[in-house]
């Protein structure tokens, strides 16, 4: 015990002496470590933010990003300002939306552009273009097209695609560029819309959207042939060189019409030929005299 | 003097005739051309997708005034300048208003019943 006490005292004395002699060196080393930590912190922050973007978005994130993205779409194209037509498209969309795999507050808008397309944003925001509506002739076709977009939205297809391709660095980059004070939901909404126009969803996601969209429309009582009729009309119209501008965006992000039609044919055959098409109601709402 | 007056009247008459011939339709006014003049007979059906919706609103936004392709490049893609469009308070308000077009449960039920459709 005595030996231990003497040893401990000696060790303490040596340590104190060493601290007195090398204390400055330790402090300098600590300072350098602290400085290095500060330098690497932004990198760590970026990594954390990147990791954050790989998490599935919460319901609130979906709403915020969807709302910001929708505002961007409206800023780009404008909305068709026709209360009756908007109400009609919302009624058809909500009729089909009842059968979605995930319930969201569905909100449908008509983009004021001649290009043919429809777009699903997070949180239940769905747009169809004036050009796409002008190519339809009955309500079952509209139901099928909206069913396709509802599926993209309910199944978080674009969000999954972005995460899968690790392109979510967009959000971090945008946030870094804009500074910390910027509204992150708005930046993510902006980035989402850019991805919307440039990202092709995988073939299986497009097939799933066609398939589930058709099935949802059929469950709602519409003719299951609606979506395939729209695709067939689009295929025929898109083959005309003068329509290149109209279909270019859609064709750049979707599989060829022929393969989508071929995928849907056996599904429609299984679902049968019954169901409503409602031409008169569609014409009255979309093309009133 | 009479000759001069006659010549003046003749010039005015000719100018009026030319003006009425070149008069352009008012773009803000709906032209009842479908009733006044029958559409030209053609063996081809009316072109899909290029048609005009019968929107009842008089308010024109963006492209609808021209039915053109604003911000769309020749290949059909949305151009970078268009994608960079800033969002304004008005755009945000329109998005918030989209919720107003959502039907009430009673309206949806009525729509479904009217079309012979199915409720979940």
Image (cartoon, coloured by chain):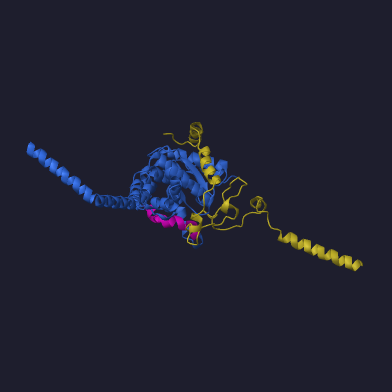
Chain colours: A blue, B yellow
Can I make out residue A226 in this image?
no
Highlighted range, magenta: A244-262
| Residue A148 coordinates in the image, percent (x, y) | 42, 46
The residue that appears at 54% across and 45% down in the rendered structure is B89
Q: Is residue A156 above or below residue B112?
A: below
The image shows residue A124 at horizontal and vertical percentages of 44, 42
Task: Look at the image and tell me in which quarter the N terminus of chain A lies.
Answer: top left
Q: Is residue A256 left or right of residue B56?
A: left
From the viewer's perspective, is residue A12 above or below residue B23? above
**Total marks in image:** 0
**Is residue A31 something that shows in the picture?**
yes
Q: Is residue A172 above or below residue B74?
A: above
- Magenta stretch holds residue A106: no
Looking at the picture, tell me which residue is in the foreground, B15 or A215.
Answer: B15
Q: Where in the figure is residue B79, as x and y percent of width and height?
A: 49, 58
Q: Nearer the viewer, residue A289 or A125?
A: A125
**How far across and down, in percent of the image, does residue A134 sit?**
53, 50
**Which quadrant holds the C terminus of chain A?**
top right
């Amino acid at each position: 015990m005595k030996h231990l006490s003497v040893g401990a005292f000696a060790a303490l004395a040596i340590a104190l002496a060493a601290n007195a002699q090398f204390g400055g060196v330790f402090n300098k080393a600590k300072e350098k470590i602290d400085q290095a930590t500060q330098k690497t912190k932004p990198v760590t922050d970026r990594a954390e933010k990147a990791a954050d973007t790989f998490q599935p978005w919460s319901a609130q994130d979906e709403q915020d990003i969807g709302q910001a993205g929708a505002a961007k779409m409206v800023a780009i194209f404008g909305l068709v300002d026709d209360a009756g037509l908007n109400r009609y498209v919302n009624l058809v969309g909500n009729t089909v939306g009842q059968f979605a795999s995930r319930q969201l507050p569905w909100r449908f808008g008509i983009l004021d552009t001649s290009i043919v397309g429809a777009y699903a944003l997070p949180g239940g925001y769905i747009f169809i273009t004036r050009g796409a509506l002008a190519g339809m002739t009955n309500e079952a076709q509209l139901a099928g097209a909206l069913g396709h977009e509802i599926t993209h939205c309910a199944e978080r297809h674009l969000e999954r695609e972005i995460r899968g391709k690790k392109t979510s660095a967009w959000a971090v980059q945008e946030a870094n560029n804009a500074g910390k004070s910027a509204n992150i939901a708005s930046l993510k909404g902006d980035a989402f819309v850019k991805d919307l126009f440039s990202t092709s969803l995988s073939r299986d996601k497009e097939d799933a959207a066609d398939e589930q969209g058709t099935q949802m429309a059929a469950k709602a009582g519409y003719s299951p042939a609606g979506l395939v009729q729209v695709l067939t009309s689009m295929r025929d119209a898109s083959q005309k060189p003068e329509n290149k501008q109209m279909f270019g965006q859609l064709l750049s992000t979707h599989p060829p019409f022929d393969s989508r039609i071929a995928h849907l044919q056996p599904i429609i055959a299984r679902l049968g030929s019954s169901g409503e098409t409602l031409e008169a109601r569609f014409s009255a709402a979309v093309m009133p005299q | 003097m009479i000759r001069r007056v006659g010549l003046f009247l003749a010039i005015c008459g000719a100018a009026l005739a030319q003006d009425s011939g070149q008069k352009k339709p008012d773009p803000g006014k709906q032209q009842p051309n479908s009733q006044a003049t029958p559409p030209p007979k053609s063996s081809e059906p009316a072109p899909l997708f290029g048609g005009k919706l019968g929107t009842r609103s008089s308010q024109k936004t963006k492209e609808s005034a021209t039915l053109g392709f604003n911000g769309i490049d020749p290949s059909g893609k949305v151009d970078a300048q268009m994608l960079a469009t800033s969002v304004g308070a008005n755009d945000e308000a329109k998005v918030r208003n989209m919720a107003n077009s959502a039907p009430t449960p009673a309206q949806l039920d009525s729509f479904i019943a009217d079309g012979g459709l199915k409720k979940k």
